[in-house]
Image (cartoon, rainbow, N blue to C red):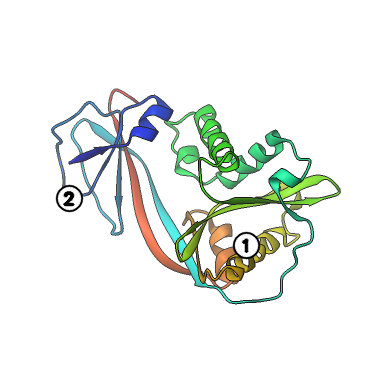
């Protein structure tokens, strides 16, 4: 059974669907889809007649229980309160997505990847996507940002990035600790952070800050033969 993904289909101007994996699927009834996502919490190998598995990733979701701690809020502001150009924020969003499947799957263009992340930022700022977005700024220079959303009794990081020229200055740590304490203040006790196993730097960073792997998700892209 294929579930059509309306948002993805409309955004990429492709017919995109999602399949719950079944053992050794070889054929599907509806071959009109340009792209099929197959996701599972278990490793799997599947063949689809007429489709090519052109990209695979292992998504990793980190989690930790939050507790009240001291933190440094200096230089961290809501985006709307500082004089930062939206184009600078877009550039940071691209940095945050450099291990995204929409970046690494070569069947998506660079323009499509960038438009996706610009849309993510736009929707975060105009309220279409729920949540908060904070930036780290020194001397009117944007150095990093983080976005997150609250889901009842827990929260999830959306995007987090530090400018390449400013990495190694603990800006990412300051942003993460700031979010944690904002959540603790409103009695949110658990924070989830999705990333990719291939992003070894991010995985090491989260582990260093006490996060543990909560869930892994195998994601594969099957493109129709005549699409790629």
Look at the image and tell me whether residue 204 can be seen: yes
Residue highlighted by disc 2: 22
Q: Secondary structure at mark 1?
A: helix
Q: Quadrant of residue 111?
A: top right
Where in the figure is residue 29, as x and y percent of width and height? 13, 33
Q: Is residue 105 left or right of residue 145?
A: left
Which quadrant of the structure image shows residue 89? top right
Q: Badge 1, how many Cα within 10 Å: few under 14, some, many 20+?
A: many
Q: Position of residue 41 (x, y in %)?
A: 31, 58
Task: Name the residue at the right extreme.
Answer: 139
Tags 1 and 2 in contact by the CB under 8 Å rule? no
The residue at the point 79 percent across, 41 percent down is: 83
Q: Nearer the viewer, mark 1 or mark 2?
A: 1
Look at the picture and state if 228 lies above or below 101.
above
Q: Position of residue 158 (x, y in %)?
A: 53, 51
Quarter of the image with the N terminus in it: top left
Above or below for 205 versus 148: below
Disc assigned to residue 179: 1
């Amino acid at each position: 059974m294929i579930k059509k993904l309306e948002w993805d289909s409309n955004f990429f101007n492709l017919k995109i669907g999602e399949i719950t994996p079944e053992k050794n699927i070889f054929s599907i009834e509806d071959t009109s889809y340009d792209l099929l996502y197959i996701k599972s919490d278990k490793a799997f190998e599947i063949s689809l007649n007429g489709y090519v598995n052109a990209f695979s990733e292992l998504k990793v979701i980190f989690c930790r229980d939050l507790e009240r701690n001291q933190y440094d809020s200096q230089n961290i502001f809501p985006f709307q309160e500082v004089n930062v150009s939206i184009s600078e924020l877009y550039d940071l969003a691209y940095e945050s997505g450099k291990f995204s499947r929409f970046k690494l799957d070569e069947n998506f263009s660079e323009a499509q990847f960038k438009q996706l992340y610009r849309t993510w930022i736009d929707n975060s700022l105009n309220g279409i996507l729920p949540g908060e977005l904070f930036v780290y700024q020194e001397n009117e220079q944007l150095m990093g940002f983080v976005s997150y959303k609250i889901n009842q009794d827990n929260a999830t990081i959306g995007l987090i990035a530090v400018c390449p020229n400013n990495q190694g200055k603990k800006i990412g740590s300051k942003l993460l600790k700031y979010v944690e304490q904002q959540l603790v203040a409103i009695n949110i006790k658990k924070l989830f952070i999705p990333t990719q196993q291939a992003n070894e730097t991010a995985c090491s960073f989260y582990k260093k800050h006490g996060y543990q792997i909560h869930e892994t998700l195998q994601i594969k892209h099957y493109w129709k033969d005549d699409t790629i």
